[in-house]
Image: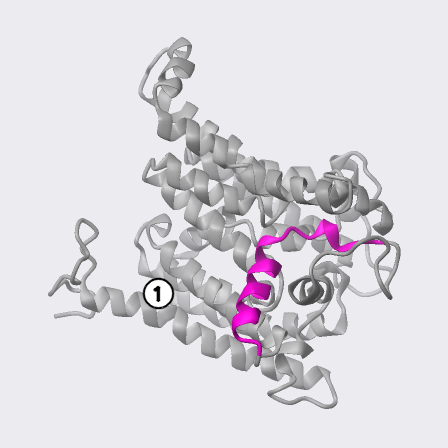
Amino acid sequence: MTVLQPDLPLAGAGALRLRWPLAATLALIPAGFVLIGLVIRYFGYAASVGDESIAGFPMGMCRWDCGWYIYIAEHGYHHFPTPGMNAAGNWAFFPLMPVFVGLVHMVLAMVPTMTLATGISILMAYVTSIIAWPLLGRDLKAYTIFSAYLLAGPWSIYFTTFMTEAAFILITTAALVALERRSYLSAGIAAGLLSATRIVGVFMSIAMAAQLLGDHIAARKPLRSFIPEILRRPDILLGLLLAPMGAFVYMAFLRWYVGDGLAFLHVQRAWARAYGNPLMFVWDALTDFPKTGWIPTFPQQLAAAVITGFVLTAILFVRRKWAAGTFSLISITVPLFAGMASTLRFTAAMAPLPILGSRLLARNWFITGIVVLGFFAADYYVARAWIDGALSLV
């Protein structure tokens, strides 16, 4: 009997009927990458700082927005102005991840916030790997690549420190799984949490509508019957209504707390964000050639991430993944109106894209092994770049 050959069903598994050897394999693969990724990033951290220690490792990996999230978890949101910092408040950072960490920290007060947040982020990335199994076509090669991507890959720093990306990719994956099963109420609940994680989470409601319309057309039903059919489905209506609820609740809080329900948007002025044509932003970044050498500049790296994201999004549409494609397209495009900042991070955490990429790369076990080893090497160098302040990683 091979490792994945069915034998005894899991107790209580019901219709899912996972088998013990497969369940154990699915649990152990990302667990192994958790350990490998921690070791790789620790060596990157140790090579980049002069006073490395295991105790200082979590805080040593805290860069950029991480400091804002620690403050929110420990003290909550600011009144204006920001104490001891600049004219910017921390309202730009949506509440789900830092508030969740803060609530857990109230229970486990003896654990430093950053250490606790690191553990929570890693756990979220681990769970993301497992629940993505059906979206990965139940292909163990794709599952291995995706797990390595999250926990020991080039952008694993986003999913294993105190940032919102771990929560964002987890909840996005949960919403897409629910949509694959046509469970629109569950998808709406997940989307509501997603919209409390990052503002682009509200676009999951549009993705849900795109999936509904795609299914309607695929069933060769007339367009005129689309709205009446939805109106006869209370689960769909409730799901669509719940999808943006997290953002609305946060806006209501800001209106009560600082007098501006759109403070998360207006505070962007403090970072001197300039709004403009996304195509021009991408073109300007792409043509920002290095003055010396051949290594792409930070703007070129961001442009490469955006273009890769659009290519993968196009493949999603070709494969008729309407919800995943719609959500990816809007969530990549909208931030581009404010420039190229953070576009690599946004693209890396767009769940449909690494899931599709993992499936495309999972040709055979040899290629899978090469990809995973490449991820390990990239994890080390990206961790060092993260600590050293590489602007493309912001």
**Residue 346 appears at what percent x and percent y?**
63, 51
For disc 1, the neighbor class at 10 Å (few under 14, some 14 to 19, many from 20) is some
For residue 366, side relative to residue 253 (left or right): left
What's the magenta region? 88-109
Whether residue 112 appears in magenta in the rendering, the answer is: no
The image quadrant that residue 225 belongs to is top left
Q: Residue at x 26, y 70 (%)?
A: 24
22 horizontally vs 260: left or right: left
What is the secondary structure assignment of the residue under circle 1? Answer: helix
Q: Is residue 229 above or below residue 49?
A: above
Quadrant assignment for the C terminus: bottom right
Residue type highlighted by circle 1:
Trp
Above or below: residue 62 compared with residue 234: below
Q: Which residue position holds label 1?
A: 365
- Residue 102 lies in the magenta-colored region: yes
Query: Up-down: is 304 above or below 366?
Result: above
Left or right, 6 with reference to 108: left
Look at the magenta stretch and give its main secondary structure. helix
Which quadrant of the figure contains the N terminus?
Answer: bottom left
Residue 8, position as x, y percentages in the image? 11, 65
| Residue at left offset 53%, top offset 75% | 108
Q: Is residue 388 visible?
A: yes
Q: Residue pushed farthest front?
A: 256
**Would you say residue 371 is visible in this rendering?**
no
| Residue 69, percent from left and from top | 67, 62
Q: Nearer the viewer, residue 216 or 191?
A: 191
Of the pair 29 and 13, the residue shown nearer to us = 13
Nearer-the-camera pick, 81 or 20: 81
Residue at 38% across, 36% down: 185
